[in-house]
Amino acid sequence: MSIRDCGRVSWNVPTSPQSVAALTEQPEQALRRRRLVLAGQIAFLPTGVLTTLLGPMLPILTARWGLSDARAGNLFLVQFLSQLAGVLLSGVMVARLGFRLVFLSGLLLMAGGVGTLYLGSPWLGMVSVGVYGLGLGLVIPTDNLMIAEVSTGSRAAAVSS
């Protein structure tokens, strides 16, 4: 630090409305925000597992159901098309129902789809993959939006951590 810099003092005074709000926030609200962020972070564990589940399960499902390569590939098509539909629905649903209901319904769809994946015929398997794909499509953007909404600092940093 030079003599010229001695007159320049940084006081770290919050300048953004979010930073000022964080300083005046009640302890209950801060705890609620931390719990929501923690729930969102915990939900990304099954979300990541289910996003990649079909790849390792494919040999097992192909052998059980006697699928050809073309029919086995349709499972991926069903998963990602239903995931796309879930992403498109999530924006409308969050605006109407709020984060919590959309987030929980996505998690329930994921659980229901995975729970019925290995139970029956190839057609039931396709429906199960579609159900958990729809759940993934609801959870991923809702989770990101929820964490960005409740974070008091940088929204981009909160979503990426």
Image (spheres, grey):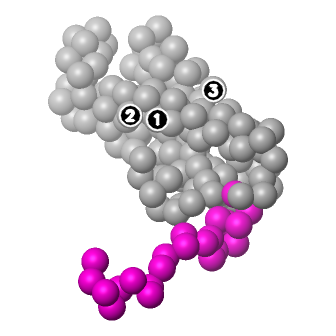
Determine if the magenta segment contains residue 2.
yes
Answer few, some or many: residues within 10 Å of disc 2's Cα (few below 14, many 20 plus, some between 14 and 19).
Answer: few
Per the image, the residue denoted by label 3 is: 108
Q: Which residue is drawn at 42% across and 11% down?
A: 118
Q: Position of residue 54 (x, y in %)?
A: 31, 27
Query: Closer to the observer: label 3 or label 2?
Result: 2
Tag 3: amino acid: Leu
Answer few, some or many: residues within 10 Å of disc 1's Cα (few below 14, many 20 plus, some between 14 and 19).
Answer: some
Q: Residue 48 carries which label?
A: 2
Would residue 33 appear left or right of 126 to someone viewing this image? right
Q: Give how far apart the Cα atoms at labels 3 and 1 are.
A: 14 Å
Per the image, the residue denoted by label 1 is: 44
Q: In which quarter of the image is residue 67?
A: top left
Q: Give how far apart the Cα atoms at labels 3 and 2 are.
A: 15 Å
The magenta-colored residue range is 1-22
Q: Where is residue 129 in the image (x, y as percent from the top left)?
A: 45, 29
Tag 1: amino acid: Phe
Determine if the magenta segment contains residue 96.
no
Would residue 148 appear left or right of 33 to someone viewing this image? left
Q: Give how far apart the Cα atoms at labels 1 and 2 are.
A: 6 Å
Q: Where is residue 137 in the image (x, y as percent from the top left)?
A: 52, 45
Residue in the foreground of this view, choosing between 139 and 24: 24
In the rendered image, the residue lying farthest to the bottom is 4
* Badge 3 vs badge 2, beta-carbon distance below 8 Å: no
